[in-house]
Image (spheres, grey):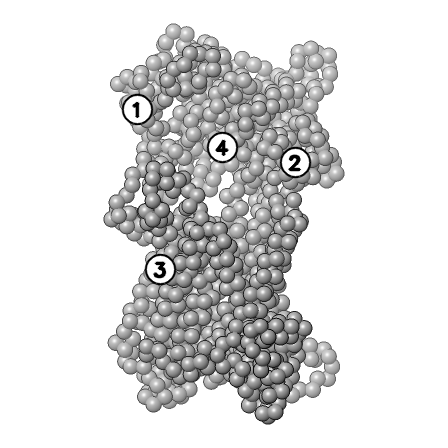
């Protein structure tokens, strides 16, 4: 993200956006806008399943969005569907995914491939499996440069070395195989790989889950540094709320394929509105608090082949009201930037926005494409 | 996805079996295989019912090397014997040899596999070395070495329990060359079961070894044994056909391989006597394919996580 | 590669060869009646028979003297003399026939590997598609057909009915060739059907195995990463899936090579190809035990060596084993 001072002085922004925006980019559009996204999996037998149901969110330039929730809540599927990395029996059944204002959903596989890695790249959990075990990591990092960007081999390898140093790995290690690196280094290598084409967005799917706490901290520090220096935008998927608290600006809590609550991290974590968010937060032990019993959320997430009518969390919610089992709660925006889908906060609650006002609040940060008239360094 | 898994309930025996039937029934490859095998099993059990007694050189009903006709649907061989008659009787001989060989393989292979996996240590090392040696021996070569020696011991035309010695030698050879694969697979399953948490849990609460073997390890192994046995049957039929073709079979017991041996000796290919070749060949392929389909289907249904394959 | 791995594999191979020699000894010397079988040749006089018996040490006690003699002789390549081939040393008899077999098997393997791996990779990648089902089905059927079940119909159709190729042999008998090109052409004509038989017999197995190997790699995370990188399907198959699938396949191919020499016996019989296979059958019917024993030893050791090569090659290819 450019600082106002740097922009005014006409200085080139360090690292940011080496490549021009895609030709189809809409001026003034936010970096990523996902609206009413639904994904359907066709099952071998029985009804099809919607692991992602009517999910909307927005990512602005330079932001870090955390997607939180239990296993199976659809957070990973949501992220994968952004670049359509779905399994053979899955497809996006509804909604739009607008990158720079360009809707990716109607694009063919070939058209979509242009955006993969160059605009949106991914860092997967468990880099041991996500890296090809029989190829050297330098080659794997250089691969998108050679194949996607058509750069000559030695230039690609040199850049791979640069990227490794950027993430704190000595460049000689480029000739190493994945199994020769420690877990933390593999994850760094994956991050270096994700940065190869200078993407606008990096999606991290549980990037630190498989690592021990010390290494986890290092990775998070690294991500934060890269974000700052390169102006990266991040989507972090994790069930670990502490990671989100440390690294992200905004958080989206998902449950059973739907969005429960979404907003600035500080607001959501200090004053959660949705009962599920509250329960999630209370499940995190506080090292400074007095001893108390572990709080668990009774029951299990619903079987998505037959989702419950109304609010999906109702069967496990201790604040459930009669209408929760019959009506799906509508999403309501509040003036502090938080969105909730819960009958405890119906439209018209204190602080809730309505109509156009709701849309205006969301456009808080600078759009990624400057309006015409402003010079871009 | 945890959202999709229903709560697990321990099935009773009958429900388990019905579930199995349901899952197996959904597999078209397994069903086709079973159908084919059923046909051949019926033919093998009572061949005389369908085509009358086995024809020999004396009772040959037709003239030599007649192509298929109304009288002889599959033609005749060089001695005038009706090939439909021979082929149907051949089903019984081929399948019986296959069955006996499979029994030997399963008994020896499973026994050694369980012992090796369960006892571990020196026993395991020794048995595995032995298994390696047998794995290495090419079956045809072993047969060629063993058969004449064994036969010279008992006499070429000897019979044991009414079965020709030559055929018994074939059964033994097939058993000797296929037990090793089964032993390996069973052993690796036993090893992984030994390490599994539920065995440890059983031990921790004080369950004795015997009970662990019976209630925990054995049920899981039975599935594997069944699937392996079917696949072994396929291999046995395949190998018996080859061994008979080479000449190790009994000319008076025309298994499919033996018929093909006779065809080759009579020069059938060069004489365009396709009817001599096609029936036994097609039968062999059908049966082997059928066993393989069923075996693979069983393996998939009963052992959904198993990656070990021959 | 790892020195420890190498030593381990060499030791195992050595021990297995020892076991094979012992088994050979057990079968051909220790079983009752062996001395008769090994010497009672209808082609030699009693004097020659006694000479032979003495040379092989059959007049010595079984253990340890005969065993030692046997081991000594075997290691120095002295495997006895053939009955059927009028006293020629077994090594020579076998050596004469090795060439045609190796040629047939070698070419057959090359064709089967290239085609089988390609077909298997393609159908394994597009799992569940029509190509996959058909390819898998054909592969299974071929895999279930012994060589002679493939060969005999080929002869009927292409040699007897259509007359394109000869029905048997490696060269036309009793012909004098005008030039070496004529001989080569004649040889090639004879080679086509046996080669097709061996290749078809092997393709089935390879394609099925490769299909499984590729299908497994398809489910791996690094393939998802490759897709996320925006690489084309073809490129992912070629540069990511294939190298990983080849690791187990190389092992399988190498091991298979050991067996194929023995397994092609039936193919040689059908075409009367003058190789080890037909030699074996001839020796069998003539009860030529010295030759049988030599073939047994050779083929079994070949399998062990093939396994060893497979292990070594795997050790070189898989970087995880290398270090």
Of the two numbered discs 1 and 3 in the rendering, the one whose residue sits closer to the viewer: 1
Question: Mark 1 and mark 3: span between their CA atoms?
Answer: 46 Å
Query: Could you tell me which residue is drawn at 54 percent across and 34 percent down?
Result: A126
Subunit under mark 4:
A
Query: Could you tell me which residue is drawn at 47 percent across and 12 percent down?
Result: A288
Tell which circle, 1 or 2, labels the residue nearer the N-terminal end: 2
Return the x and y of residue A252 as percentages of the image width and height: 46, 21
Q: Which residue is mark 1?
A: A315
Tell which circle, 1 or 4, labels the residue nearer the N-terminal end: 4
In the image, residue B5 sits, relative to residue B258, either above or below, namely above
Q: Which residue is mark 2?
A: A141
Could you tell whether B199 is left or right of A176 in the image? left
Answer few, some or many: residues within 10 Å of disc 2's Cα (few below 14, many 20 plus, some between 14 and 19).
many
Q: Quadrant of the C terminus of chain C?
A: top right
Return the x and y of residue A128 as percentages of the image width and height: 57, 37
Of the two numbered discs 1 and 4 in the rendering, the one whose residue sits closer to the viewer: 1
Answer few, some or many: residues within 10 Å of disc 3's Cα (few below 14, many 20 plus, some between 14 and 19).
some
Return the x and y of residue C201 as percentages of the image width and height: 52, 67
Of residue A272 and residue A145, the one placed in the foreground of this image is: A272
Query: Could you tell me which residue is drawn at 52 percent across and 67 percent down?
Result: B138
| Residue B47 seen in the current view | yes
Q: Which residue is mark 4?
A: A81
Of residue A50 and residue A290, the one placed in the foreground of this image is: A290
């Amino acid at each position: 993200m450019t600082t106002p001072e740097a922009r005014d002085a006409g200085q080139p922004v360090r690292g940011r956006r080496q490549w021009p925006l895609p030709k189809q980019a809409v001026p003034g559009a936010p970096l990523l806008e996902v609206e009413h996204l639904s994904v359907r999996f066709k099952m071998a037998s029985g009804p099809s399943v919607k692991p992602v149901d009517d999910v909307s969110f927005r990512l602005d330039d330079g932001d870090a969005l955390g997607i939180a929730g239990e296993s199976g809540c659809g957070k990973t599927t949501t992220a994968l569907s952004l670049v359509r990395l779905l399994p053979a029996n899955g497809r996006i059944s509804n909604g739009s995914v607008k990158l720079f204002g360009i809707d990716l959903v109607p694009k063919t596989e070939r058209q979509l491939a242009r955006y993969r890695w160059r605009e949106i790249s991914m860092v997967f959990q468990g880099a041991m499996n996500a890296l090809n075990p029989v190829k050297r990591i330098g080659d794997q990092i250089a691969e998108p440069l050679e194949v996607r960007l058509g750069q000559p081999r030695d230039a690609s390898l040199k850049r791979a070395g640069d990227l490794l140093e950027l993430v704190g790995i000595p460049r000689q290690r480029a000739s190493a195989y994945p199994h020769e690196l420690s877990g933390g280094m593999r994850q760094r290598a994956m991050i270096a790989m994700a940065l190869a084409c200078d993407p606008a967005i990096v999606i991290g799917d549980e990037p630190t889950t498989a690592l021990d706490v010390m290494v986890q901290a290092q990775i998070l520090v690294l991500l934060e540094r890269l974000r700052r220096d390169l102006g990266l935008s991040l989507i972090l998927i994790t069930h670990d709320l502490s990671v989100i608290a440390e690294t992200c600006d905004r958080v989206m809590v998902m449950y059973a394929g739907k969005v429960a609550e979404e907003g600035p991290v500080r607001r959501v974590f200090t004053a959660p509105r949705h009962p599920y968010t509250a329960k999630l937060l209370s499940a995190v032990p506080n090292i400074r608090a007095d001893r108390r019993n572990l709080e668990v959320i009774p029951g299990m997430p619903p079987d998505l082949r037959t989702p419950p009518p109304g609010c999906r969390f109702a069967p496990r919610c201790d604040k459930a009201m009669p209408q929760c089992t019959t009506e799906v709660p509508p999403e309501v925006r509040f003036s502090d930037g938080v969105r909730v889908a819960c009958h405890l906060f119906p439209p018209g609650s204190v602080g809730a926005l309505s109509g156009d006002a709701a849309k205006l609040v969301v456009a808080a940060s600078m759009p990624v494409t400057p309006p015409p008239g402003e010079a871009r360094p | 996805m945890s959202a999709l898994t229903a709560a697990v309930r321990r099935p009773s025996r009958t429900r388990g079996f019905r579930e199995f039937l349901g899952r197996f029934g959904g597999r078209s490859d397994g069903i086709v295989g079973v159908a084919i095998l059923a046909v051949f099993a019926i033919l093998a059990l009572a061949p005389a019912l369908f085509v009358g007694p086995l024809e020999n050189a004396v009772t040959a009903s037709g003239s030599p090397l007649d192509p298929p006709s109304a009288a002889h649907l599959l033609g005749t061989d060089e001695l005038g014997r009706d090939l439909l008659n021979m082929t149907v009787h051949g089903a019984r001989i081929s399948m019986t040899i296959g069955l006996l060989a499979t029994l030997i393989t399963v008994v020896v292979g499973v026994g050694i596999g369980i012992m090796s996996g369960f006892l571990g240590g020196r026993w395991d090392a020794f048995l595995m070395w032995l298994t390696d040696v047998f794995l290495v021996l090419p079956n045809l070569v072993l047969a060629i070495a063993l058969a004449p020696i064994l036969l010279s011991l008992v006499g070429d035309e000897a019979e044991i329990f009414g079965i020709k010695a030559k055929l018994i030698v074939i059964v033994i050879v097939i058993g000797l060359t296929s037990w090793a694969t089964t032993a390996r697979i069973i052993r690796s399953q036993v090893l992984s079961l030994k390490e599994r948490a539920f065995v440890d849990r059983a031990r921790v609460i004080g369950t004795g070894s015997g009970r662990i073997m019976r209630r925990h390890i054995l049920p899981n192994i039975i599935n594997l044994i069944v699937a392996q046995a079917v696949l072994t049957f396929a291999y046995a039929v395949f190998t018996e056909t080859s061994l008979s073709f080479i000449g190790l079979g009994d000319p008076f017991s025309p298994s499919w391989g033996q018929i093909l041996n006779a065809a080759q000796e009579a020069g059938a290919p060069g004489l365009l006597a396709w009817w001599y070749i096609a029936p036994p060949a097609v039968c062999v392929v059908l049966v082997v394919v059928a066993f393989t389909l069923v075996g693979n289907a069983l393996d998939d249904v009963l052992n959904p996580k198993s990656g070990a394959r021959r | 590669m790892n020195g420890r791995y190498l030593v381990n594999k060499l030791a195992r191979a050595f021990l297995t060869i020892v076991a094979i020699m012992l088994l050979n000894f057990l079968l051909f010397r220790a079983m009752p009646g062996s001395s008769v079988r090994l010497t009672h040749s209808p082609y030699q006089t009693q004097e020659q028979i006694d000479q032979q018996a003495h040379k092989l040490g059959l007049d010595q006690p079984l253990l340890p003297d005969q065993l030692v003699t046997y081991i000594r002789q075997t290691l120095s390549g002295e495997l006895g003399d053939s009955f059927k081939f009028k006293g020629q040393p077994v090594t020579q008899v076998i050596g004469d026939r090795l060439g045609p077999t190796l040629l047939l098997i070698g070419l057959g393997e090359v064709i089967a590997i290239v085609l089988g791996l390609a077909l298997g990779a393609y159908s394994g990648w597009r799992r569940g598609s029509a190509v996959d089902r058909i390819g898998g089905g054909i592969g299974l059927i071929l895999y279930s057909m012994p060589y002679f079940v493939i060969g005999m119909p080929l002869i009927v159709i292409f040699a007897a009915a259509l007359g394109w190729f000869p029905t048997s042999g490696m060269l036309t008998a009793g012909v004098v060739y005008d030039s070496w090109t004529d001989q080569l052409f004649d040889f090639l004509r004879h080679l086509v059907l046996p080669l097709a038989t061996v290749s078809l017999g092997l393709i089935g197995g390879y394609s099925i195995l490769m299909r499984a190997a590729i299908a497994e790699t398809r489910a791996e995370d690094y393939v998802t990463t490759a897709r996320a990188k925006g690489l084309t399907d073809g490129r992912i198959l070629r540069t990511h899936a294939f190298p990983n699938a080849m690791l187990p396949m190389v092992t399988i191919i190498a091991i298979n090579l050991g067996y194929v020499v023995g397994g092609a016996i039936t193919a040689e019989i059908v075409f009367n190809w003058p190789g080890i296979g037909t030699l074996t059958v001839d020796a069998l019917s003539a009860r030529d035990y010295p030759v049988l024993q030599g073939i047994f030893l050779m083929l079994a050791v070949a399998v062990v060596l093939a396994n060893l090569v497979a292990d070594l090659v795997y050790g070189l290819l898989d970087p995880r084993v290398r270090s």
